[in-house]
């Protein structure tokens, strides 16, 4: 299991997807170059530039602070060839700079060497020394709890027997921690503890990592573990973006020696004793305080909450910071808070009621003013739209009358009677819709939806009237074309020879067809007549 730190290394650590690898590490430093319009380089931009340079890494993380204009990105490579290629590429950039989106970026690369020294092959006097007082224990920091089935909530348990109970759990043969570390050799003890940085209770509850002391029965097992883990990184087959640098050291503090274990147990006993004494004192003080509280005191907090709620209403609903009635209520509450009495409670209650009534009235007045202003806006909008629609309808009526005057002989034709009737009806509906709706009626509440429905109907009715007038104009023009074609057919020398008259008779039977269909058939007849006339002219020459 022994390997050199500079070699490529990969260990499938247990059956659950954990992989220990050797990582070749370097830091790439980027900062905006001279004349650049940027003041900093983001992590995403750094990855984009490295990708453009052909630098292919296995993992990357930013290790500088966000507000620092100098960005340091730590790159991890599992293959030496990829690391050497990346190092040569970045270090070989002209003037140590690259360009990104038209801006110059200074770029430097530095190798990060592992500081882990190999252990001696033997430990003289190992068997003659007590457990924990010899090199038999490793200290591993910052392991992900989820990957090792460690319950971090147990960190809050400071009872006397907690370390012994938890150690027994982790030393079971089927526990993940035991199975993984037992892979390097037989174990004597395992003790899990929270990361050193997580000192307060809130951090202990939320932490997702842990530290662990693992004690082996022989030196060879410890050496196997150090050779495999020290200076390596920990990955997981199911979490490809996650990478943990393994901080592993041989414990020199004798943490798992009998003497250290006894000291920690004594310290826990003392903490438990102190906590129990403190709790007893607090309980006695609380009972004494509760016994001296009178009925009036119980009203202080609820009345304060009511005052705070009124202050929020004053700010939210009226945009005011003070009100005389509310100021008076707060003053009376201060008296109640200092000297709780029934009279003081009644005085505060009366003042709060008066302030509430005043705020309710002011909100009512404000709402009424807002509704009045909105009604004025609606009325202007409605009247403007109605006026514009009425003008358009007048124009449509004039156009219809002008068209009827132009084609007066055709207005009684069956082809246009229905269209004329529909156009007149649409104009009448439009004129009725153009009467402005009442926006300020007290008998009926009007809202935005009512106004919008009126405007939508007005627009639809005017559009319908315009469409129907256009239809009448188009129909009369088609009818005029029909009569022109009829005159031209009658003027032909031999209309029966080309069935022109038959075509006209067929059109007379189809006045119920669409205007476009009729126009197409009439145009075809006109085209036939024109062709016959041109042929006759050629023959006459």
Image: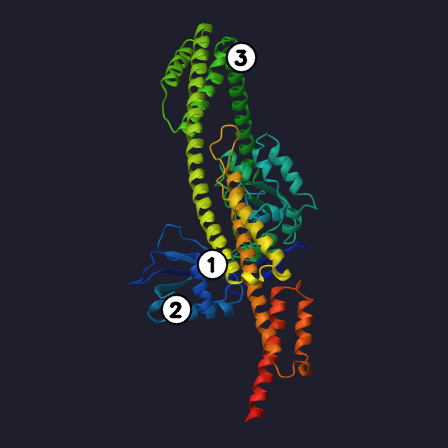
Please state which of the two labelled residues, at mark 1 or mark 3, is closer to the viewer: 3
Q: Earlier in the sequence, mark 3 or mark 2?
A: 2
Answer whether residue 9 is visible to the viewer in this image: no
Colour option used: rainbow
Q: Decide which of 252, 42 is in the foreground and name it.
A: 42
Q: Nearer the viewer, residue 103 or 25?
A: 103
Let me know if residue 381 appears in the view. Answer: yes
Q: Is the residue 290 above or below the residue 23 in the image?
A: above
Instruction: Estimate the spatial distance between the alpha carbons at disc 1 and disc 3, rounded to whole Å.
Output: 60 Å
Callout 2: helix, strand or loop? helix
**Residue at position x 41%, y 14% in the image:** 333
Mark 3–mark 2 Cα distance, whole angstroms, equals 72 Å
Local packing at callout 2 (Cα closer than 10 Å; few below 14, some 14-19, many 20+) is some
Q: Residues within 10 Å of mark 3 (few under 14, many from 20)?
A: few
Please give the label number shown on residue 201.
none
Are the residues tagged 3 and 2 within 8 Å (C-beta)? Answer: no
Q: Quadrant of the N terminus?
A: bottom right
Residue 140 pos. (x, y %): 54, 48
Left or right, residue 177 beside residue 63: right
Query: To which residue does mark 1 refer?
Result: 114
Which residue is identified by label 2? 91
Q: Earlier in the sequence, mark 2 or mark 1?
A: 2
Residue 58 position in % (x across, y down): 53, 62
Nearer to the camera, 445 or 493: 493
Q: CA distance from mark 2 to mark 1?
A: 20 Å
Q: Which element is circle 3 on?
A: helix
Q: In the rendered view of the protein, which quadrant contains the C terminus? A: bottom right
The residue that disc 3 covers is 287
Q: Residue 60: horizontal and vertical position, in percent? A: 48, 58
Please, what secondary structure does the residue beneath circle 1 have?
loop
């Amino acid at each position: 299991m022994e390997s050199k730190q500079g070699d490529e290394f990969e260990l499938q650590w247990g059956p659950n997807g954990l992989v220990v690898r050797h990582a070749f590490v370097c830091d790439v430093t980027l900062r905006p170059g001279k004349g650049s319009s940027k003041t900093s380089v983001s992590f995403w931009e750094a990855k984009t530039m490295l990708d453009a340079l052909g630098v292919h890494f296995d993992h990357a993380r930013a290790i500088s602070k966000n507000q620092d204009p100098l960005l340091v990105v730590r790159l991890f490579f599992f293959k030496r060839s990829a690391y050497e290629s990346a190092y040569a590429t970045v270090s070989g950039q002209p003037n140590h700079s690259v360009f990104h989106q038209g801006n110059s970026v200074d770029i430097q690369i530095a190798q990060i060497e592992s500081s882990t020294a190999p252990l001696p092959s033997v430990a003289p006097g190992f068997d003659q020394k007590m457990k924990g007082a010899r090199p038999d224990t490793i200290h591993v920091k910052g392991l992900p709890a989820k990957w090792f089935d460690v319950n971090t909530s147990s960190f809050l348990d400071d009872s006397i027997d907690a370390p012994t109970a938890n150690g027994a759990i982790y030393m079971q043969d089927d526990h993940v921690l035991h199975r993984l570390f037992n892979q390097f050799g037989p174990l004597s003890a395992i003790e899990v503890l929270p990361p050193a940085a997580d000192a307060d209770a809130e951090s202990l509850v939320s932490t997702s990592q842990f530290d662990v002391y693992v004690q082996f029965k022989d030196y060879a097992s410890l050496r196997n573990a150090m050779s495999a883990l020290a200076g390596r990184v920990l990955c997981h087959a199911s979490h490809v973006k996650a990478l943990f640098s393994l901080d592993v050291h041989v414990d020199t503090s004798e943490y798992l020696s009998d003497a250290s274990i006894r000291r920690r147990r004594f310290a826990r006993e003392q903490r438990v004793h102190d906590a129990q004494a403190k709790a007893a004192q607090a309980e006695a003080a609380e009972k004494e305080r509760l016994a001296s509280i009178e009925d009036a005191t119980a009203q202080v907090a609820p009345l304060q909450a009511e005052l705070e709620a009124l202050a929020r209403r004053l700010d939210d609903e009226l945009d005011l910071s003070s009100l005389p009635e509310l100021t008076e209520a707060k003053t009376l509450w201060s008296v109640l808070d200092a000297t709780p009495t029934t009279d003081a409670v009644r005085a505060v209650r009366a003042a709060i009621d008066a302030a509430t009534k005043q705020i309710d009235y002011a909100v009512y007045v404000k709402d009424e003013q807002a509704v009045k202003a909105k009604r004025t806006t609606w009325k202007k909008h409605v009247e403007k739209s109605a006026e514009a629609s009425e003008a358009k309808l007048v124009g449509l009526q004039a156009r219809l009358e002008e068209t009827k005057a132009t084609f007066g002989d055709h207005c009684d034709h069956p082809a246009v009677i229905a269209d004329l009737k529909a156009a007149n009806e649409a104009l009448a509906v439009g004129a009725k819709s153009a009467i402005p709706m009442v926006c300020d009626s007290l008998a009926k509440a009007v809202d935005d939806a009512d106004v919008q429905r009126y405007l939508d109907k007005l627009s639809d009715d005017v559009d319908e009237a315009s469409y129907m007038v256009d239809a009448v104009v188009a129909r009369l023009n088609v009818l005029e074309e029909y009569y022109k074609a009829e005159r031209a057919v009658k003027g032909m020398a031999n209309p029966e020879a080309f069935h022109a008259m038959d075509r006209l008779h067929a059109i007379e039977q189809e006045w119920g067809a669409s205007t476009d269909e009729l126009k197409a058939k009439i145009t075809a007849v006109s085209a036939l007549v024109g062709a016959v006339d041109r042929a006759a002219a050629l023959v006459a020459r």
